Amino acid sequence: MTVSDIEGELDNPFWSSLTTRHAHLAQGGTLARRYPATISPLAGLPGVAPANIAALAALVEVGGDVATVGPFVPTLPRTWETLYESQVTQMIRVDRSVLPEGHVDASILGAADVAEMLALVELTKPGPFRPRTIELGTYLGIREGGRLVAMAGERTWVGDFREVSAICTHPDAQRRGYARALMGRVVNRMLRAGEIPFLHVESRNLRAIEVYLALGFVRRTEFRLLHAKRIS
């Protein structure tokens, strides 16, 4: 795997996912694409010309939202409200060594677990998660006393690169190694499939970045993040 291969596939990750591996889920066309709102607010653009911005607006109902990262994050007109802006670091793991999975009881999460998954995401804020997000990949969870207290899974998919996402732990269950154990399982699952794990993390979240570095991920690049709502 060469540096040029990596950059060619990951430089515009959401657009790349929506035009290849997840094209069957995508709404939109050649100027803008997004996941269905019930799956994810994630969207991608191949440019930021007025035609791209108009195409994106056509995919979002008034009151609806989208989020994107990459080289083509648009400057939106007054018909949009910015909900959140930040910088995110993209990290990849080209190291093929397996990770420890910890001595925890983890299980695959499904439709019956969605309500609890949504509640955990609302509490811990790992990133956008919607009722149908589990259609993007496999999600694993850990329970204590029957209650879901930690989870992690797969989100976008670009060529041989698979995104690790929704890594979160309930505040009552932190510092027990749950996030590392689930990361180990998710990453090892990708390695067995011949995939290369990658992820996005807020650049100011130095604690999380240090954890990912310790797990063999390396910083690749930094992108602007925009989460916006269409207001008219």
Image (spheres, rainbow, N blue to C red):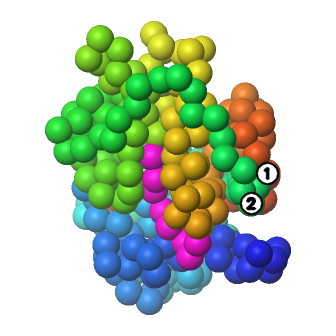
Q: Quadrant of the C terminus?
A: bottom left
In front here: 55 or 154? 154
Which residue type does callout 2 highlight?
Answer: Val
Q: Which residue is mark 2?
A: 94
Where residue 107 appears, as percent x and y from the top left, is 35, 35
Where residue 135 appears, as percent x and y from the top left, is 30, 58
Q: Are marks 2 and 1 in contact (CB under 8 Å)?
A: yes
In front here: 187 or 24? 187
Number of other residues with Cα within 10 Å of mark 2, as a class: few under 14, some 14 to 19, many 20 or more: some
Where residue 180 appears, as percent x and y from the top left, is 60, 31
Q: Quadrant of the N terminus?
A: bottom right
SS for tag 1? strand
Query: Which residue is outermost to the bottom?
Result: 30
Query: Which residue is outermost to the left?
Result: 112
In front here: 2 or 69? 2
How many tags in the picture?
A: 2
Q: Is residue 94 above or below residue 131?
A: below
Relative to 88, 76 lies left or right: left
| Residue depicted at 44% across the width and 76% down the height | 21
Work out whether mark 2 precedes mark 1 in sequence or the reverse, and give the earlier one: 2
Where residue 72 appears, as percent x and y from the top left, is 62, 72
Q: Is residue 130 above or below residue 112?
A: below
| Residue depicted at 65% across the width and 70% down the height | 10
Question: Cα distance, mark 2 to mark 1?
Answer: 8 Å
Q: Which residues are magenta?
A: 153-160
Q: Which residue is mark 1?
A: 218
Quarter of the view holding residue 183: top right
